[in-house]
């Protein structure tokens, strides 16, 4: 299915200009960008991080047991998934949330066959709670679900236009790298996604597009490989 894609959003993207939590106006704006892609006939899976509410590694560094801290982070992703579902359905996009941690009152359990059926019925599926296991990031969950769902592409939506050869905030001569290999990302330790996620995407041969979610028509431009973006393949 060459029109089945996975969108990875960071939790921080949902904060807007706030230092913490969820900014509804920002989520609504992102939802409208997703709708544009949905109208083109793409089957869309989404994974959202939880860093705007709680970050597992930070909690662990401050004294909370790492496993417990990671589970708390997974719960944060469920809250983000439910908020994004609400914004999508307000603009008439049917959506289902599937959680890797059982919580039947607010989300379906993750079942691959059921998720595929939702996609075939033109519903967007949001995968919450990461992989359901501690010590794995939502980036890794994105590569895992993209592999399981036979997605043809992962879009990593960030706050920057793509991958640069150096920090564009510090260096005016920083160059956007349009194309880069999985091995270059791994060998140069580029923090686009964690190395487990990149390795899994490489093994499954799923290219990754990195684009700025806050720019108008960013997702469509990336899919058409126009405008500013980076492609890992």
Image (tube, helix red, strand yellow):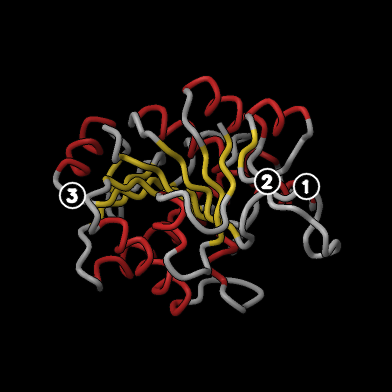
Q: Which mark is residue 71?
A: none
Disc 2, disc 1: CB below 8 Å? Answer: yes
Of pointers 2 and 3, the one earlier in the residue sequence: 3
Mark 2 Cα shell of 10 Å, populated few (<14), some (14-19), many (≥20):
some
Mark 3 Cα shell of 10 Å, populated few (<14), some (14-19), many (≥20):
some
Q: CA distance from mark 2 to mark 1?
A: 7 Å
Q: Report x, y in % for residue 62.
A: 79, 53
Determine which residue is flagged by label 1: 165
To which quarter of the image does residue 183 belong?
top right
How many marks can you see? Answer: 3
Label 2 vs label 3, nearer the camera: 2
Q: Report x, y in % for residue 92.
A: 19, 68
Q: Is residue 150 above or below residue 54?
A: above
Q: Which mark is residue 177?
A: 2
To which quarter of the image does residue 146 belong?
top left
Asked if residue 91 lies left or right of residue 229, the reply is: left
Mark 2: which secondary structure? loop
Of pointers 1 and 3, the one earlier in the residue sequence: 3
What residue is at 61 percent from the left and 59 percent from the top? 161
Q: Nearer the viewer, residue 45 or 180?
A: 180
Asked if residue 204 lies left or right of residue 181, the reply is: left
Q: CA distance from mark 2 to mark 3?
A: 34 Å
Determine which residue is flagged by label 3: 122
Q: Nearer the viewer, residue 151 or 137?
A: 151
Of pointers 2 and 1, the one earlier in the residue sequence: 1
């Amino acid at each position: 299915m060459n029109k089945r894609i996975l969108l990875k959003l960071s939790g921080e993207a949902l904060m807007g200009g706030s230092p913490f939590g969820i900014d509804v106006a920002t989520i609504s704006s992102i939802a409208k960008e997703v709708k544009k892609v949905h109208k083109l006939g793409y089957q869309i899976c989404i994974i959202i991080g939880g860093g705007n509410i709680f970050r597992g590694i930070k909690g662990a560094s401050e004294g909370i047991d790492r496993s417990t801290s990671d589970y708390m982070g997974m719960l944060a992703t469920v809250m983000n998934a439910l908020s994004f579902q609400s914004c999508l359905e307000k603009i008439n996009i049917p959506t289902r949330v599937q959680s890797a941690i059982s919580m039947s009152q607010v989300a379906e359990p993750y079942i691959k066959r059921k998720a595929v059926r939702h996609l075939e019925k033109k519903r967007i599926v949001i995968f919450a709670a990461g992989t359901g296991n501690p010590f794995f990031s939502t980036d890794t969950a994105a590569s895992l679900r993209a592999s399981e769902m036979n997605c043809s592409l992962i879009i990593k939506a960030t706050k920057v236009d793509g991958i640069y050869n150096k920090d564009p905030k510090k260096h005016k001569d920083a160059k956007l790298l349009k194309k880069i290999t999985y091995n270059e990302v791994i060998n140069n330790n580029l923090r686009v996604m964690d190395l487990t996620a990149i390795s899994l995407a490489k093994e499954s041969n799923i290219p990754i597009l990195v684009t700025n979610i806050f720019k108008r028509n960013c997702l469509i431009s990336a899919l058409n490989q126009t405008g500013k973006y980076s492609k890992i393949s």
